[in-house]
Image (cartoon, rainbow, N blue to C red):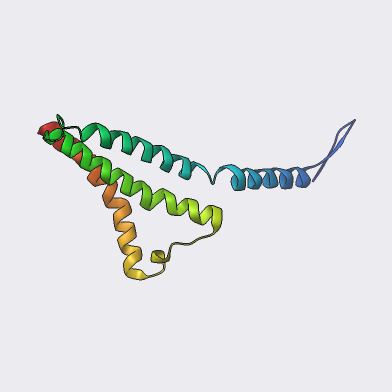
């Protein structure tokens, strides 16, 4: 499709190809890295919470124990969901447990169950 202007001729198909190429470039350069960044920040936060809740004064408090269990589940969830996604996008390393039927079902179950378990530790800590 060609649009004729008094000054320029614009080829729309070339513009759309250019936009698609630009979006592919952005996807390959920048969309790969947020899972790794989220995993690193999550691990730093987990380490800080671990040192905070394992102090001698807080170690025997049940609210802190519930919170610590929630943090442990959160870091396991981050490791199972974000880190394999980064490895597959950046280095084309596929996780082998997605290929077998039983382990694929287990992985899907864990990706759904772990966030719910982590969320349910908060009301347990609040009730206690």
**Residue 97: horizontal and vertical position, in percent?**
38, 65
Left or right relative to 104: residue 54: left
Where residue 25 sits: x, y (%)?
65, 46
The residue closer to the viewer here, 87 or 123, is 87
Q: Quadrant of the C terminus?
A: top left
Look at 69% across and 47% down and name the residue there. Answer: 21
Left or right: residue 50 versus residue 40 is left
Relative placement, left or right, of 41 versus 21 is left
Residue positioned 62% across, 43% down in the render: 26
Q: Position of residue 50 (x, y in %)?
A: 26, 37
Above-or-below relation of 51 to 31: above
Label tally: 0
- Seen at 27% across and 46% down, the residue is 73
Give left or right: position of 64 versus 98: left
Q: Which residue is found at the position 67% from the left and 46% from the top?
A: 20
For residue 2, which quarter of the picture? top right
The residue furthest right is: 7
Q: Observer-nearest residue: 112 or 77?
A: 77
Q: Position of residue 98 (x, y in %)?
A: 40, 64
């Amino acid at each position: 499709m060609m649009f004729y202007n008094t000054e320029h001729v614009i080829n729309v198909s070339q513009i759309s190809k250019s936009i698609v190429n630009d979006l592919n470039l952005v996807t390959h350069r920048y969309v790969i890295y947020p899972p790794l960044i989220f995993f690193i920040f999550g691990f730093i936060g987990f380490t800080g919470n671990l040192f905070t809740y394992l102090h001698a004064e807080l170690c025997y408090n049940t609210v802190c124990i519930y919170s610590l269990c929630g943090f442990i589940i959160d870091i396991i969830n981050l490791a199972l969901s974000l880190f394999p996604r980064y490895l597959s996008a950046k280095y084309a390393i596929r996780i082998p447990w997605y290929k077998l039927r039983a382990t694929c079902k287990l992985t899907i179950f864990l990706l759904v169950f772990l966030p719910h378990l982590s969320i349910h530790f908060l009301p347990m800590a609040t009730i206690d």
